[in-house]
Each structure stands twice: as structure tokens, then as C-alpha cells.
Image (spheres, grey):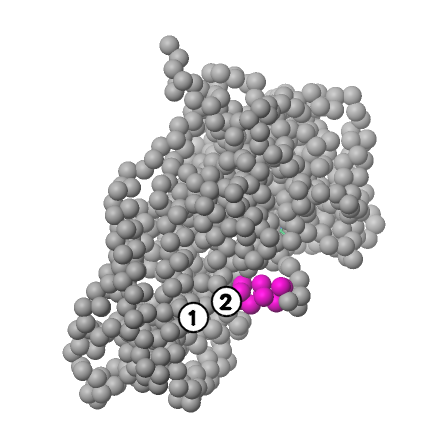
Amino acid sequence: METSESRRLFATESFGGRAVYRLHAVTVAAGILLVLYYRATHVPAAGEGRAAWLGMLAAELWYSAYWVLTQSVRWSPVRRRPFIERLAARYGERLPCVDILVCTADPKSEPPSLVISTILSLMTYDYPAEKINVYLSDDGGSVLTFYAMWEASSFAKHWIPFCKRYNIEPRSPAAYFSESDGLQDLCTPKEWSFIKDMYDEMTERIDTNVMLGKIPEEIKEKNKGFDEWNLKINSKDHQPIVQILIDGKDQNAVDNEGNVLPTLVYVAREKRPQLNHNFKAGAMNSLIRVSSVISNSPVIMNVDCDMYSNNKDTIRDALCFFLDEEMGHKIGFVQYPQNYNNMTKNDLYGNSMKAINKVELRGLDSAGGPLYIGTGCFHRREILCGRRFTEDYEEDWNKGSKYRTQENICDTEEKAKSLATCTCEKDTQWGDEIGLKYGSPVEDVITGLAIHCRGWESVCHNPTRPAFLGVGPSTLAQTLLQHKRWSEGNFTNFLSKYCPFLFGHGKIKLHHQMGYCIYGLWAPNSLATLYYVTIPSLALLKCTLLFPETTSPWIAPFIYVFCVKNMYSLYEALSCGDTLKGWWNGQRMWLIKRISSYLFGVIDTLRKLLGLSQMTFDVSSKVSGDDVSKRYEQEIMEFGSSTPEYMIIATIALLNLVCLVGGLLHIMTGGWNVLMDVLSPQLILCEILVIINIPVYEAMFLRKDKGRIPFSLTLTSVGFVMFSLLVEILVPIF
Ligand SMILES: O=c1ccn([C@@H]2O[C@H](COP(=O)(O)OP(=O)(O)O[C@H]3O[C@H](CO)[C@@H](O)[C@H](O)[C@H]3O)[C@@H](O)[C@H]2O)c(=O)[nH]1
Ligand SMILES: [Mn+2]
């Protein structure tokens, strides 16, 4: 007999160990209250370090409030488990069509051969091919990317049947061939080499043409699409281009085994230099419109061009959530975490974001839903187009399946082009109530917030075999650039009308609002951190105490909060699959990001508010030189140039070294009570900062390779340190 439980298409499970977590959180909270009480009641007299003390109080108040926010997503995490066998039993192949939207922006930082590997992986889902429609938006408007897409459309005819026949994974050819060494027990070696050679030859042709920067005439004759580049066009100034490379509705579009192919469309929306194109959000909105006249599927999935599909079941998994009878009607989007395939063993730059993926997204899930993070996400088309949640709404899952049967393909392309022009959004709600929102470099997060505020929930699914794998930042510069964009974007959102506390008030739970603010307040964290890593160390030089004395009982809550908080973060990292060294590297990056990216995030947000600068979206590069990649693999930090970010990092590292030496000298010359003060929290803090910065000193003084900190930068930071010591002598805040 069927029970209501066995009819469910997904299960929601809570985690064990909640009691331990909650006990820890309550005791840390008590510790924090004691620390703050001590700070507020022991303010020294003027002239004895009052200003510095009050600064410590302010920083600790900030950290405490922020800590409370971060607990909101840890209180009750849940895990979702879809049942694809039940989906198959109930629906068979009667499943909705899916439009897959992919964005690329620049053939230099996002090589076309990388883009098409992603595209090919998306065309080979274990899902009826006639129900898959893949769209690529090329903001680079590049003939090179179009050419690669054209190559991919013919390679797909061999690749799709190969993947399905032998049920291989991953289905991105680049990833598959780099993982498998030819020892295939599934297919004959001959067949394997045949397809591999075909792939290698194709990538070689693409890479050669990309290097040359143009496409040979004899190739251009093979597809009418190349004519679009007859006029001299560039990425910032061109007409709209829509080319249907494979029309899935065409009976003749079949693979080499005679099966239907998925639809494949290349789109470059119109660009004019004088008009704002709204970056990725603008590209996504064009794709939403273009796809509405070509396939108009009720489900939209979107990924970045470097995020290949690593799991053939992802579409079916996601549909389990939407089609579930009990909860499905409430779910607006299904978000998969952002995973990378190029992380080093000990996660040198802390980019794997394991804790965000495994802890925070799942905690948000129980609070109303994870954020929309811009990639690896399935939406209902209707909600992206602004629909509010109502209990009686019924989705038309058959939408799109019988679409456009009579129309001629050229007419469809023309119609689609008219939806990819610069003017088609004029005087409409696009970018505001409809589609992705404009005006923020993290357009995705506010778009998701608006969806939650319209009454929808979202779910996060983190399968054991990751659904998508992308190219994460692999240099310090790329990491800092990405985090600057994120922290600045989220802070801009926080200060705008989309502040979760205001915009979400009365619409989403307080818990959920707090979760959103964790990211919104990343940037201002920099101020408290900057204070905490400079002032207590400088105070060492003047023997000014900024913590309770080692003999005072008040030292206990300080030590307790510090130790337990760090032990918990270590436990969380290890249980998410990090190594011990990976956690340590993560702590270093925690510091570095706060004193550089986040600080610039604050500064640029303020500049934008004052109208001094405009929004930008710096695309991160997905390629790096051989030398640089080698150092990355050896987990050696990459500096190599003089940027303001490195300047701050180097200066603070050096400052702490000097202060530590100064502090120790004081102790040795007997200025302080030797035994007790070696153990003082202030000295320990300074020591930890020095130990964590060891790779920075190495880059300044010991390394000889190109990735070291340039000598000129080292000199300048010495100058800055001397200057701050001078200021310390002259300005009496201690
Ligand atoms: O004008 C633009 C700029 C960017 N992109 C695309 O946007 C995506 C993300 O850009 P990337 O440089 O790779 O940034 P990431 O930091 O990796 O992106 C993360 O952060 C973004 C928000 O800052 C989200 O939109 C992304 O989905 C998320 O992966 C890429 O596919 C780009 O091709 C465009 O299509 N047009
Ligand atoms: Mn990316």
C-alpha cells in the first residue's frame, strides 16, 4: 500500500550532533557576554590607553554581533535526498522540458575550448534529448566562440551516443579524457581512441584558430552564421546575433545512431558602447527572452561557462523537488553548491568553500531556502518572470514541448534577435520585477532574495557526486578579485533597498534575514579585523595592556571564547573534508581577505554611494601561465606584482613581526613581569599573526622565483611600518 511518505519524491533529514553544536554555541555566547561586560566595566582612565581600549570594545561588539548572525545558519541544518527511482516510476519519460542557460564573456579569460566542454557535458544529461535546450550567451560577441560552438555541434553527434552507450562520467570531454587514461573496460580500445582522437583534433583546431584570432575562409563557408561577423564588429559594439546550431525539433537533426539531438543555440545580445548592458544579469535576461520563443521550457537551469556537469542525473534530481506532491508547489528554485575541480590538496587560497556548501547553505535551507548563487541553479521560468507564490497556482509542466512546430527556423531566429536588442527592455520591468535584477555585481543574491520575498521557498541539494565542477581562482590575485566583487556586491545590496532586514521584513523569517546578512556584512568585517591585527600589537611596544592581566580571573572568558571558537571551526572544517593544513591555510586567507579584498569592498561601495565610481563586473580568468600553475600545484603563494592589496598584506605582516620583536625585547630587558607576560593574550595574538604570515615573510625575503613579493613593494612596506611606528609615538591613543 502506498503511504504518504512513500509517495514523496524527496526526503528531508536533519543532522546528528545538533545537541553538541547547540551546547557549544550557548557556552560561547555566555563567554562573549562576559568578555563584553569586562570590556565595558574596565575602561582605563584617559591617558592610559582609553581610546585603544574603546576601539577593542567596538571591534569585539562587532565580532559578537556577526557571530550571532553566523549561528543563524548553523542552528538547524537539513539535508535533502531526492528519489529518482520514484520519479521514474511515476512519470516515466513524461517529464518537463528544460532550458539550460550558459554565460560566457571573454574568449581570452574563458577559452572557447573550455566553454564547449561545458556545453557538451550539458547536452549529455541522462534525460530525453528532445527535452533539453542549451543556450550560450556570448558577451564577448566573438566569432571564435561561435566557431567553437559550431565544432561542438558536430562533435556532439558522436559524443552523446558514446556517453549514453557506455554510461560514462563525467560527460565533459575535457574532464573525462583527463581523468581516464585509456584503460577502459567498458568499450573497445579502438572505439575509445577514435573518439579521443576526434576530440583532440577538434580542440587543436579550436585552440589554433583562437591563437590566430581568426577563422579560415573555407570554414566560414560551411555555416551561414559566420556571415554575422562580415561587418567589422567588436565585443562592445555589435548587432544582436542568434544562431540555432542544432534545432531539436528538426527530424533530420540526429546523432550518428539516429537519435534526436538537444537544441543548441548561440546568442550574442546587441551591444552599443553608449548603452549600459548590465553584465551577467543582462546576459541572463536576454537568454530568458530568447529561449521563450525557441523552446519556452517551464524549467530553466543556469550555469557559468566553466561549470561543467559532473553528474548525469542532476536534471532528474532537481525535478524530484519541483514535482513532489506535498512540497513541490512551494519550491521556486533548487540550488546546487559551487564546487571546483582545481583545488589543491590543502586548499591554498581557501576557495573550496566547503563550510559554506556543507554547512551554511544547508542551514539556510531550513530557514526558508539557500541563496541563489548564480550558477548550478534550477528555476521555474514563471518565478524568474516575477510570479508570486499562491497556494492555488498550478504549473503547466507541458509548456514548451509542442512549441514552434510550424515556424521556419529563420523566422524564429529573427523573432529571437528582436528580443536580444538594447532597446527591447526600455520601459519594461526587466531587471527589476522581471528576470535577474540589475545594479549589483552579485545580481544573483538579490534576485533570490526577491523570489523568497514573493513567497517561494528554495532547496539546496549537495549530492555525493558533485553536480557541477567549475574552475576556481588559482592565484591570490584572482581570489582577492573574486572576493572583492562578492563582498562589495553584497555590501552594496545590504545598503540598498534590498537590505534583508528591510526588504525581507514581514516577508521572510528573521532567521532567514540574518542568514542573508552574513554575506551582506562580509565587507565591513574588514574594519574590525584591521583594528584587531594592528592596535594590540602596536600597544605591545608601549607595554599597554589591552587584555586582562594573566593572573586575573577575567582572562578565562577571553581564552574560552578564543579556543572554543577556533576548535569548533577546526572541527567544522575537518568534518567537511578539509585537511588540518587546509584549515590553517583557510585561517590565513580569512585574515588576508579581510584586510585587503573586504577593505577595498567597503571603500568602493562608499565611492559608488557617493557617485564617484560606477559598477563593474571583473570577469575572473580561468587560465594561468605554466610557471604560475606549477607554483599553485606546489601550494606556494603567488604574489609577483605590486598591487595595493599586497601592500597592505605585506605591511601588516611586517608590522606584527616588528611588534613581536619589540614586545619580546621588553620582556627580556625586564620591563615586564617575565613569566606572566610571555603568556599574555596580546603577545600570543601577535605570535599567531606572525606564524600565520610566515609564507608572506618568505615571499618578501627568501624566495627567488617570479611569484615572490617584488623588492620595491617590500621596501615600501618597510616605509609604511616605520611611519606607523612614528605615528604611534606621536599620537597618544595608548
Ligand atoms: O559581463 C559579463 C560578466 C560576466 N559574465 C559571466 O558571468 C559568469 C561569472 O563570472 P566569473 O568571472 O566566472 O565570476 P565568479 O566569481 O566565478 O562568479 C560567481 O559570482 C558571480 C557573482 O559575482 C555569479 O554571478 C556567478 O554565477 C558565480 O559563479 C561567467 O560565466 C561570465 O562569463 C557575463 O556573461 N557577462
Ligand atoms: Mn567563475
For image coordinates 53% across by 72% down, the residue present is 644
Closer to the camera in the image, 526 or 149:
526
Please state the horizontal and vertical placement of residue 387, each as a whole percent of the image: 63, 34
Instruction: Please indicate whether residue 40 sits to the left or right of residue 421 in the image.
Output: left
- Camera-side residue of 359 and 446: 446
User: Which one is in front, 715 or 451?
Assistant: 451
Where residue 276 sits, quadrant-wise, is bottom right
Q: Looking at the image, is 32 positioned above or below residue 640?
A: above
- Quarter holding the C terminus is bottom left
Q: Is residue 714 above or below residue 240?
A: below
Q: Residues within 10 Å of mark 1 (few under 14, many from 20)?
A: some
In this picture, is 217 found above or below 67? above
Residue under the point 41% across and 52% down: 69
Asked if residue 91 lies in the magenta stretch, the reply is no
Instruction: Check disc 1 and give the amino acid type.
Output: Leu
| Residue assigned mark 1 | 530
- The magenta region covers 599-609
Q: For the residue labelled by badge 1, is the local secondary structure a helix, a strand or a loop?
A: helix
Q: Is mark 2 within 8 Å of ligand 1?
A: no
Q: Position of residue 395 (x, y in %)?
A: 60, 24
- Above/below status of 193 relative to 574: above
The residue that mark 2 highlights is 599
Residue under the point 21% across and 65% down: 556
Q: Residue furthest top?
A: 1
Quarter of the image for residue 702 reads bottom left
Which x, y percent locates residue 489?
56, 56
Residue 602 lies in the magenta stretch: yes
Q: Badge 2 local density, few (<14 within 10 Å), some, or many (20+)?
A: many
Mark 2 lies on a secondary structure that is helix
